[in-house]
Image: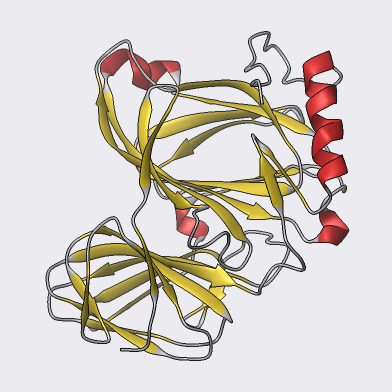
Amino acid sequence: MTTVTVIRPRPEDVEGQPILRPLPSRECRSVGPFVFFDHMLQTRYAPGSGMNIRQHPHIGLSTLTYLFEGELLHRDSLGSDQVVQAGDVSWMTAGSAIAHVERTPDELKAKGFNLHGLQVWLASPKAHEQGPGHYSHHPAISLPVSDNLGVTIRMIAGSGFCLESPVPVLSPTLYAEVHMQTATTLLIPDEHEERAVYVLDGEAQLDGEPVQAHSLVVLPAGQSMALFAETECHLVVFGGAPLDGPRRINWNFVASDPALIEQARQRWAAGDWPTVPGESGRIELPVR
């Protein structure tokens, strides 16, 4: 098999929610526009408990939240107030300054629930880094799906596998959820220059080499590859066009120019930032 880059994610904790984070890593800083990848591990919340990510800022990126189980309430400084259910896409473009919160809706919190999903960051092209913020919600029913020979593909964002998502991405993007029955094969074409596979569950082989669950495998450019499911598999395929230059990540800020990050840090620390209506709590700027 052609040499691929295999990344084992590091465990993290976000406000009590256990996650695995394969991007960014020493081996790979980005795949297409994707510069940050969090797998929110399946977690059981008892009645009265839940996730509560307090008000925090972003610049220079789009966040995309996609759940397999559970719900989240998204609120932001644009005035958005949206419950995001499993299978929906929550898409927020930060532009020059945005703040948001994500928490468990009160009704769900009262009865207990499972939470499992992904949140990724996509770096904005330089032309959009300092543009206006934007939020859109895309219910599960709006996402295109193909189901053929035991392989089901849902296009979360961007395009690929003859599918195109309605999510308003800012550069050529591929982000697909895939379910494979045992002994099925998925051909991953080279239609996007940069691609990776993250296996959520199951055992698979990529061009004959084993791929472990919770592994991120970066594929070589310009080569189609075959993924074979040894068991039932759940995975995502993602990537797109290369970034238009390197990006720096500092806390919740992404930028091509470090001066933009320093400016954002100073503004958030000083309280000079758009606020989420009705929200007073916030996450303070961490010490360097």
Quarter of the figure that contains the C terminus: top right
Identify the residue at image location x=19%, y=81%. Answer: 184
* Res 164 visible: no
Where's residue 218, x and y in %?
Answer: 44, 71
**Is residue 26 toward the left or the right of residue 284 in the image?**
left
Give how far across and how far down residue 142 sits, in percent: 52, 59
141 over 114 or under it: above or below? below
Residue at 83% in and 55% down: 128
Q: Residue 229 location in percent, x, y?
A: 19, 75
- The answer to whether residue 212 is left or right of residue 131 is left
* Rendered view: 180 above or below 110: below
Residue at image x 27%, y 76%?
A: 151
Left or right: where 194 falls relative to 204: right
**What is the tally of numbered marks visible in this picture?**
0
Residue 111 shows up from this direction: yes
The quarter of the rendered structure image containing the N terminus is bottom left
**150 or 189: nearer the viewer:** 189
Above or below for 257 versus 189? above
* Nearer to the camera, 142 or 229: 229
Quadrant hosting residue 108 = top left
Residue, x 62% and y 18% (percent of image)?
283
Look at the picture and state if 167 lies above or below 284: below
Measuring from the top left, give residue 121's x and y in whole percent.
59, 49
Can you tell which quarter of the image residue 81 is in? top right
Nearer to the camera, 207 or 173 = 207
